[in-house]
Image (cartoon, rainbow, N blue to C red):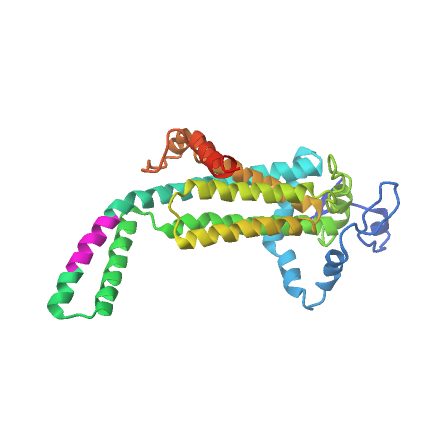
Amino acid sequence: MLCRLGGRWLRPLPALQLGVRVPPLAPTSTGGIKHSALPAWAVASVSAVGSGGPGSWYEALATSAPVQGAEEVLLGVHTATGLPWWACIGLTTVALRGAVTLPLAAYQHYILAKVENLQPEIKNIARHLNQEIAVRANQLKWSKRAARLTYLKNMRRLVSELYVRDNCHPFKATVLVWIQFPMWVFMSIALRNFSTGATHSEGFSVQEQLANDGILWFHDLTALDSTWILPISVGVINLLIVEIFALQKTGMSRFQTYITYFVRAVSVLMIPVAATVPSSIVLYWLCSSFMGLSQNLLLRSPRFRRLCRIPLTKSDSDTPYKDLFAAFYAKFISRT
């Protein structure tokens, strides 16, 4: 049983009561002691970050307040529910994504919908401004460069005034990224601390529990997934999210196209990366990606969008899932 002491979770051990320092080693299924099933670099990095060397930056991050907060959240859910760690990781992920990122994702869609509805007005302003600048440039004998700079300066000002008027600056749509990505990093590092015994407060006891609280083919959550099922699943779900976004955008700009290809490449590269970290982390990534896919599909529902008071746009459809399936079939299946 875990107990709380001085703001830290501890598990009383006889050796610790006698003043003997016990190294954080994971137990084997036969009851003995084994070395970590992680690759050598993963274990070596734990000791490498201890004394201000090249890994001191990671030590600072791994012991930072946000990571410790993530550890407290995981331990609190585990203690409150009594669930095995595989279920605890999944439940915590669903709770965080539902309570934090889903509202932010709805707010992102709200801002983007208002920006989309401003496009006809922006195009109308651009047309009139272009005509006025052309007349003015002809009267004052401006060069093409001066006329262009004047047009851009005034266009930025007018568009900015529209965003202020409707309270929908596109930068507000990025708040999801600034919250979701750090949360993903902090949770991943917290689970790595648990799995490698690097955490200073409860590494031994939680590592022992993780080694026996898996399910199906990944019984040991501190070990790698040698079957590659979890890593490949993470990559596939991330690719599905990217493709849903790409199918939703009919006329992407060159920049959006490059970003889409970049995210596809990152999704594929996540597969070998996920194959080199503990299964507890990969399980969290899989649950997080699955929740991201679910939220993406949910926010396409007209009923849910009305519930979130997301404005109607010209691109909205009454049958989004049917349209998505038709686009997916036309792009990937009918061509084969």
Q: Is residue 65 above or below residue 319?
A: below
Q: Is residue 16 above or below residue 117?
A: below
Residue furthest out toward the front: 336
Residue furthest out toward the left: 139
List x then y, in percent, for residue 2: 74, 42
Q: Nearer the viewer, residue 77 or 88?
A: 88
Say whether residue 120 is visible. Answer: yes
List x then y, in percent, for residue 143: 20, 70
In the rendered image, which quarter is residue 309 located in? top left
Q: Is residue 127 magenta?
A: yes
Say whether residue 186 is visible. Answer: no
Residue sitting at 73 percent across and 34 percent down? 216
Left or right side of 166 for 104: right
- Main SS, magenta region, reads helix
Left or right side of 321 for 205: right
List x then y, in percent, for residue 128: 18, 53
Q: Which residues are magenta?
A: 122-132
Left or right side of 231 for 139: left
Residue sitting at 37 percent across and 29 percent down? 318
Q: Is residue 292 magenta?
A: no
Q: Nearer the viewer, residue 250 or 267?
A: 250
Quarter of the image for the N terminus: give it. top right
List x then y, in percent, for residue 203: 74, 50
